[in-house]
Amino acid sequence: MGPLELLWAVLIAVFAVVGVVRGYPKELGVTTTILAALLLLTRGGQSILGLLDAYLVNYVNSSAILEGQYSDLIQSLFYVLVFVLVVVISYHGETLAFDGTPPKGPLGMALNLISGLLNGYLISGTMWYYLHIFNYPVQVLGLFRPPLTEFAQAYLVPLIPVPLLEPYLLFLVPFMIVMRVLR
């Protein structure tokens, strides 16, 4: 597989195209859902994993999730799969959309593109974050071979969205919801 930043950039580009097609009012609704998912995972992810682990200990007599040979893989897959599930739900069917009609012409196209790029950055960057903090456990599956390129280590990993947004999520999520309600 190629460099991880290539996959990251391709995912951002795909979501940029999706943003252009869907329009920024719908994309802002997805952004709100993504931020809420990040708040849930950063504040309660470890607690949920702890409860799952305590429940499973009764059946397998060992800690399968928080300890063991594949614990990093299981934990990273938990975070990524929960996050991807929320993203799929937020894009599927009736979505949380902001009111308004995108302006016509280049301004509307630019707003749609920017909102798609933002969501692509949040989605692909969050998945990268959960792989990164668990030391890329997908190596076991043969999906990635470290090390990261120097460019990724120096410029992209510091810009992963979760650590940048985590201190502000408790304020961003209610702000986005209030903005949705107020128009």
Image (cartoon, helix red, strand yellow):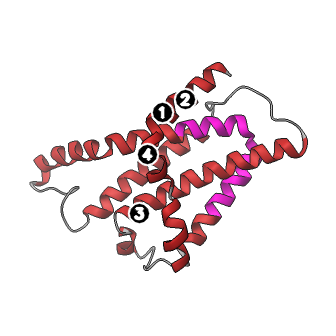
Question: Which mark, residue 45?
Answer: none
Q: Earlier in the sequence, mark 4 or mark 3?
A: 3
Dot 4 falls on a residue whose secondary structure is helix
Residue 88, how many percent across, how many down?
55, 44
10 Å neighbourhood of mark 1: few (<14), some, or many (≥20)?
A: few
Question: Which amino acid does the dot numbered 3 rest on?
Answer: Leu
The answer to whether residue 33 is above or below residue 20 is above
Give the residue pinned by disc 2: 175
Residue 6 painted magenta: no
Residue at 51% x, 53% y: name it.
161
Question: Which amino acid does the dot numbered 2 rest on?
Answer: Phe
Residue 134 visible to an observer of this rendering: yes
Give the residues in magenta. Answer: 10-33
Residue 92 visible to an observer of this rendering: no
| Foreground disc of the pair 2, 3 | 2
Q: Which of marks 2 and 3 is nearer the N terminus?
A: 3
10 Å neighbourhood of mark 3: few (<14), some, or many (≥20)?
A: many
- What distance separates the C-alpha of mark 4 from that of mark 3? 17 Å
Where is the C terminus found, in terms of image quarters?
top right
Give the residue pinned by disc 3: 131
Question: Which amino acid does the dot numbered 1 rest on?
Answer: Phe
Q: Earlier in the sequence, mark 3 or mark 1?
A: 3
Dot 3 falls on a residue whose secondary structure is helix
Give the residue pinned by disc 1: 171
- What distance separates the C-alpha of mark 4 from that of mark 1? 10 Å
Compared across the picture, whether 63 is left or right of 91 comes to left
**Residue lying at the far top of the rendered structure:** 182
The answer to whether residue 95 is above or below residue 141 is above
Question: Which mark, residue 166?
Answer: 4
